[in-house]
């Protein structure tokens, strides 16, 4: 079955989807989980607006930051609000 009913404007939705994809400032992540394929294996990295980052790598566990979280901050620039949990 087609996702559009008769009379719906497929072209309009495609144009809107393209515009949204070009405006990442419309997006704000609340939480997410990602598997990061690092040089030393896979690492589970997550973000939630209440607690911030978490990563399964040893470096993160000892320092509270790591290359995985820093890379994701660069990729998601403007789509997550960086803060310490105490600032919420």
Image (tube, helix red, strand yellow):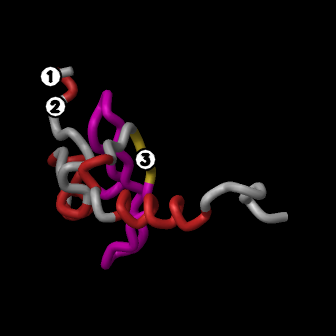
Query: Is residue 12 depicted above or below 88 in this figure?
Result: below
In this picture, residue 15 sits left or right of residue 3: left
Residue at the far right in the pictured view: 1
Q: Residues within 10 Å of mark 3 (few under 14, many from 20)?
A: few
Q: Position of residue 60 (x, y in %)?
A: 23, 51
Q: Which quarter of the figure has residue 86?
A: top left
Q: Position of residue 53 (x, y in %)?
A: 28, 43
* Pointer 3 residue: 32
Residue placed at 33% from the left, 47% from the top?
A: 27
Dot 2 falls on a residue whose secondary structure is loop
In this picture, residue 39 sits left or right of residue 17: left
**Towards the viewer: 12 or 3:** 12
* Pointer 1 residue: 87
Instruction: Please identify the quadrant where the C terminus is shown.
Output: top left
Dot 1 falls on a residue whose secondary structure is helix
Residue 66 inside the magenta-drawn segment: no
**Residue 24, labelled with which disc?**
none
Q: Position of residue 74 (x, y in %)?
A: 18, 61
Residue placed at 17% from the left, 40% from the top?
A: 82
Marks 1 and 2, Cα distance to the nearest angstrom? 6 Å
* Pointer 2 residue: 84
Residue placed at 15% from the left, 47% from the top?
A: 63
Query: Earlier along the polypeptide chain: callout 2 or callout 3?
Result: 3
Residue 51 inside the magenta-drawn segment: yes
The reply to whether callout 3 and callout 1 are in contact (CB within 8 Å) is no
Query: Is residue 81 depicted above or below 72 in this figure?
Result: above
Q: Residues within 10 Å of mark 1 (few under 14, many from 20)?
A: few
Residue placed at 72% from the left, 58% from the top?
A: 4
The reply to whether callout 1 and callout 2 are in contact (CB within 8 Å) is yes
């Amino acid at each position: 079955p087609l996702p559009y009913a008769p009379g719906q404007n497929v072209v309009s939705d495609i144009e809107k989807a393209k515009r949204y994809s070009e405006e990442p400032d419309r997006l704000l992540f609340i939480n997410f989980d990602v598997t990061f394929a690092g040089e030393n294996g896979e690492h589970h990295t997550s973000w939630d607006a209440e607690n911030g980052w978490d990563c399964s790598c040893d470096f993160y566990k000892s320092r509270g930051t790591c290359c995985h979280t820093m890379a994701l901050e660069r990729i998601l620039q403007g789509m997550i609000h960086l803060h310490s949990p105490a600032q919420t």
